[in-house]
Amino acid sequence: MARILLIETSTSVLSVALAVDGTVVAERICREPRMQAALTAPLVKEVLDEAGLKAPDCDAIAVSSGPGSYTGLRVGVSTAKGLAFGAGKPLIAVGTLDVLVDGVMANTDRPSFIVPMIDARRMEVYTAVYNAAGERLTEIESHIIGPESFAPYLEKGKVLFVGDGALKGKDVIAHPNARFEEAFPLARYMAPRAQKAFEEGKFENLAYFEPFYLKDFIPTTPKKLL
């Protein structure tokens, strides 16, 4: 029996779950933005308490590894690394775009292609293209949405654009094969890939693992200081 704690903090929605042999048995979701720093640890405790467990009772700690919010990823990864180190358990990383795609695979009819999109300011998104089986076909990139974005895939079949950045394309990509759905990566959808990684022994180096930011963090000046 594999008990895996799942932590997802890459977007404005924070979620924590516990999976046993790939099945989620406890879950907490906070949809209030920018609460990762304040609520990640408390939600972890709530999930473990519900299951009657402590961190050392888990077999692994899994975290959504990015791309996504710089601050959110830092909080999630530091929390996961701290739990794994303190409990002496392995760390598993699950790509955030994979989490979005697995949410589609669990909940909707499968289109020919799935294009997860994480908001990256203005008309820019972090994205990649996946097939109907949930397999990634392209490299993960930072992409500025335009009228011709993903045209080769739209010509081949139905394309679902999904994520917190997906609606950016609704008024720009006019192809009839395009469908847009706002969604967020949730910890519960990490369970299948985390379970597979656990079974295959694909663990991260606790000392050196860092989130996949994709782009360097660029600090901005708060408006009230301008």
Image (spheres, helix red, strand yellow):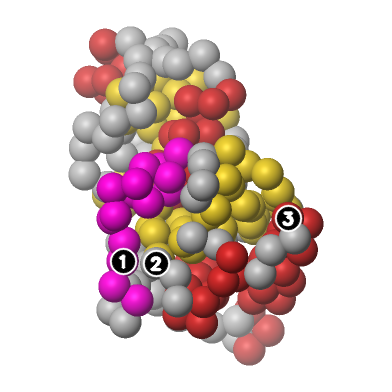
Does the magenta portion include 199?
yes
Q: Is residue 154 above or below residue 22?
A: above
Q: Which residue is denoted by mark 2 in the rendering? A: 90
Magenta stretch mostly in which secondary structure? helix
**Picture disc at residue 51:** 3
Q: What span is in magenta?
A: 192-206
**Residues tagged 3 and 1 counted as in contact (Cβ below 8 A):** no
- Residue 11 position in % (x across, y down): 56, 56
Name the residue rendered at 27%, 12% in the picture. 155
| SS class, disc 1 | loop
The kind of residue on which mark 3 rests is Ala
Q: Quadrant of residue 56?
A: bottom right
Query: Label 2, label 3: how many angstroms apart (C-alpha)?
Result: 20 Å
Classify 10 Å Cα crowding around label 1: few (below 14), some (14-19), many (20 and above).
some
**Element type where label 2 sits in the image:** loop
The residue under the point 44% across, 34% down is 101
User: Which badge, 2 or 3, comes first in the chain's sequence?
Assistant: 3
Q: Nearer the viewer, residue 161 or 7?
A: 7
Residue 196 percent across, percent down from the top left: 36, 42
Q: Nearer the viewer, residue 151 or 203?
A: 203
Residue type at mark 1: give it.
Glu
- Real-space Cα separation, disc 2 to disc 1, in angstroms: 7 Å
Q: Disc number at residue 184?
A: none
